[in-house]
Image (cartoon, rainbow, N blue to C red):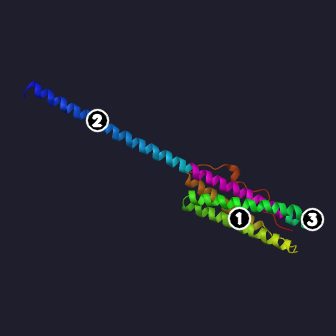
Amino acid sequence: MTPELLTVIVGAIGALAGAGGALGGTVVAKNQAREQIAAAQEEQRAAARRGAYVTFLACANVFQSACDELADQMKRWPESREHCERVHVRYMSEWNELVRSRAAVEVEGPAGVAAAARKLGGALGALSHACDSWYARLQSGGRNGTDLTALGSSVWDERLMFAEAARMELGGERLPEMLNAPSSGSTQSAV
């Protein structure tokens, strides 16, 4: 083998090794970029789920407070009729917000969290039904109230279950504590 031929062969091997290294580096860089994009996308999805969970819990608290305020006003019927009607409008608005926020959880969250949201929504729905029935009785001339104590306790239990399911799905991440506190009058009974 001549030195020129040996030089050409060694040069060709070096060129192939360099090209192979560059190609390998490109493949590794592309895989790393894909992994970074996938991680960023999962982080965005987790942030969307967390936002949906926090919003739903906040709406649940606000709605339960609206129920409590409506119950307070209904206890004072007929003296509070005008104010009670304004509170009822707010209560209905808060219900609509609650339903919208629950839908976001059911879309963004996995099955376990969506099921916990449905249970909390069901407990709030039972509380809402009791308030609606009481309000309708007052509107038609009735007086008797409804004991909301058991319903308020059920809402509290389901709120805790939902918060725990959300925490576990988010990898144990803590949700804001204020969202886990019961509303001030959530276990009141009617007169």
Q: Which residue is mark 3?
A: 79
Where is residue 147? Give x, y as percent: 80, 69
Is residue 91 shown above or below 171? below
Quick one: 169 or 29, which is closer to the camera? 29
Q: Which residue is mark 1?
A: 124
Q: Is residue 114 left or right of residue 85?
A: left
User: Where is residue 26, by image quadrant?
Assistant: top left
Residue at x 67% of width, y 64% of height: 121
Q: Is residue 103 left or right of residue 79?
A: left
Quadrant of the drawing holding the N terminus? top left
Is residue 155 shown above or below 133? above
Where is residue 72? Give x, y as percent: 85, 62
Q: Which residue is mark 2?
A: 21
Is residue 142 shown above or below 180? below
**Which residue is situated farthest in the right direction here?**
79
Q: Amino acid type of disc 1?
A: Leu
Region of the chain picked out in magenta, as a range: 47-72
Q: CA distance from mark 1 to mark 3?
A: 27 Å
